[in-house]
Amino acid sequence: MPEKVIAILPTAERKPVVRLNMPLAPIEMLLVLGMIIWGTHYSVAKAALSVLPPFLFNALRFSAAVATLYLIMRASSESFALKRSAILRLIFTSFLLHVLYQVFFINGLRYTTVANSVLISTIAPVGVIIVNILLRRERGSWRLFSGMSLAFGGVLIVILSRYADQIGLGTPTTLLGDALTVIGTFIWVGMTFSLRTLMTDNPVIPTSFWLLLCGTVLDACIAIPETLHFDWSLLTWEVGLAVLYSGVVSIGIGGAIWNLALKRIGASRTASFLNLQPIVAAFVAVIFLGEPFTLWLVLGIGLVIVGMTRLRIG
């Protein structure tokens, strides 16, 4: 009998341990927080842009974000040093993210509806995954494609059910904004990969700070004409709060979370969390605007959750 027990035990020890893939890792929990922040930002930015011209809005909110990261770094005694080899990529990435992309996104949002902007932006995570496959950084598996399709389909259901009477892509009143948003989305996909390389080789918080500082300087220069002609009496405390939310919370905190996730779990897995933004926006509308919680919304949310689960393990 003892011999049999000894013979059986090694086999039992070699059995693979079954791990559940459902619970979120800490970085993924932070990403969910980041998507809650960004999901509410569309409406906040749209309200601010009804008063502030786009480049001045960018200059103000980036200044607030830079100040936030600076205080965080001083409080935590974080070093501001970066590798010299990162400087050129940092300037290039900052130009893509904080100037070129923002020009298209902010002006696109100004000349189209929030519904159209959210709908067009849903192609971003799909674009990141497809580029990753084309670059052979990721293997195109059935689980990956099915997860991507389910999440994308769920997002479309959520958007279409919520904005059914507000979506009008390519109409005379939104055509310019829609086109700018499409271009901005493609720029964002390209920027994601440049940012991923930058974050992989450098510490996240100092890199985020220098990216923002560089972008703020560039945006401030572009905003000079708007600053000189703006009627500052229009800058109410409500607009000021919108600028602070956009800068401190959305760019400062949300951006730092995003950059950390790119470093920790890669571009595709991080980008998949963008599918949560329309869901967050829908929940905000249900809670604060009294919009109905429909079966279509439940179906869309379910598809997104199933799709993202397959993406996480695929």
Image (cartoon, rainbow, N blue to C red):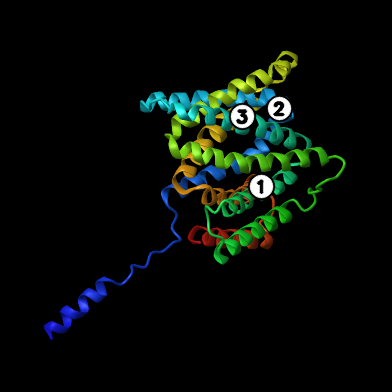
Instruction: Locate residue 18 relative to residue 285 in the image: left or right.
Output: left
- Give the vertical position of 286 relative to 105 (above or below): below
The numbered mark, 1 or 2, whose residue comes first in the sequence reads 2
Label 2: few (<14), some or many (≥20) within 10 Å? Answer: many
Sequence order check, earlier mark of 2 and 3: 2
Query: Tag 2: residue type?
Result: Pro
The reply to whether discs 1 and 2 touch (Cβ–Cβ < 8 Å) is: no
Residue at 66% of width from left, 25% of height from top? 57
Percent of width and height locating residue 118: 69, 46
Mark pair 1, 3: CA separation: 34 Å
Report the Cα–Cα distance between label 2 and label 3: 16 Å
Q: Quarter of the image containing the N terminus?
A: bottom left
Left or right: residue 105 versus residue 29 is right
Residue 241, picture quadrant: top right
Mark 3 highlights which residue? 95
Which residue is at a point 13% across and 83% down the rendered structure image? 3
Check disc 2 and report its element: helix, strand or loop: helix
Residue type at mark 3?
A: Phe
Q: Locate residue 15, reporting x and y percent.
A: 30, 72
Nearest to viewer (mark 2 / mark 3): 3
Pointer 3 local density, CA inside 10 Å: few below 14, some 14–19, many at least 20: many
Q: Residue 48 location, x and y as percent?
A: 69, 30
Marks 1, 2: nearer the viewer: 2
Instruction: Check disc 1 and report the residue beneath it.
Output: 285
Q: Earlier in the sequence, mark 1 or mark 3?
A: 3
The disc label shown at residue 54, or none: 2
At mark 1, the secondary structure is helix
**Looking at this rendering, what residue extends furthest in the right direction?**
172
